[in-house]
Amino acid sequence: MRAVIQRVARARVAIGERSVGSVGRGVLVLVGVSPRDGDDEVRWLADKVANLRIFSDEAGKMNRSLLDIEGAALVVSQFTLYGDARKGRRPSFVYAAAGPDAERLYEDVANGLESMGVQTATGEFGADMQVELINDGPVTILLDSDKTF
């Protein structure tokens, strides 16, 4: 499972003119799922996002988590995180999980965050979405359950 975590002042996802989900201070989480992912990776990612210390404390150090600041998470599926562009000019997506499996695991990540007390909004799986955000910092963190980076 891969994720791009962006610390945000606010973020919103829309489909056309319809707003699907939005959050204030917190994180935007772009989630990619591979065929090898399962419940262990879901738990790992949700816990990592909720407890990642990327928010400033009183001294200005990144020492507080999403839970500490009572921030929110906007979780958006993004199969292109498993795009392989090492050869040729068009990325291959053979390492991305198929729709039904990926959708369940993506939803489980959002549910896992909610179960930890994080206010959570989502995009719409498989939809062509527009994501707007104000990256706070900017702070962007890459996560990979296989720990390849």
Image (spheres, rainbow, N blue to C red):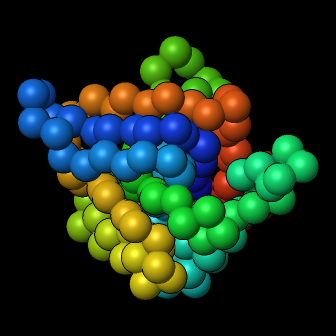
Q: Is residue 133 above or below residue 59?
A: above
User: Is residue 112 in view from this perspective?
Assistant: no
Q: How far across and down, in percent of the image, does residue 103 sit?
A: 29, 64
* Residue in the picture at 21% in, 36% down: 14
Residue 128, by quadrant, is top left
User: Is residue 11 in view from this perspective?
Assistant: yes
Q: In this view, does 145 lie above or below 111?
A: above
**Is 86 left, or right, of 12 in this rendering?**
right
Q: How far across and down, in percent of the image, does residue 75 sit?
A: 40, 55
Q: In this view, does 126 lie above or below 130?
A: below
**Count of marks, rendered view:** 0
Q: Quadrant of the N terminus?
A: bottom right
Closer to us: 72 or 124: 72
* Residue in the picture at 60% in, 71% down: 67
Residue 2, by quadrant, is bottom right
Closer to us: 77 or 122: 122
Q: How far across and down, in percent of the image, does residue 15 sit?
A: 15, 35
- Toward the top, the furthest residue is 89
* Residue in the picture at 85% in, 44% down: 60
Closer to us: 61 or 128: 61
Q: Is residue 143 above or below residue 15?
A: below
Residue 107, by quadrant, is bottom left
Q: How far across and down, in percent of the image, does residue 88 sit?
A: 56, 18
- Toward the front, the furthest residue is 58
**Is 35 left, or right, of 60 in this rendering?**
left
* Residue in the picture at 66% in, 69% down: 68
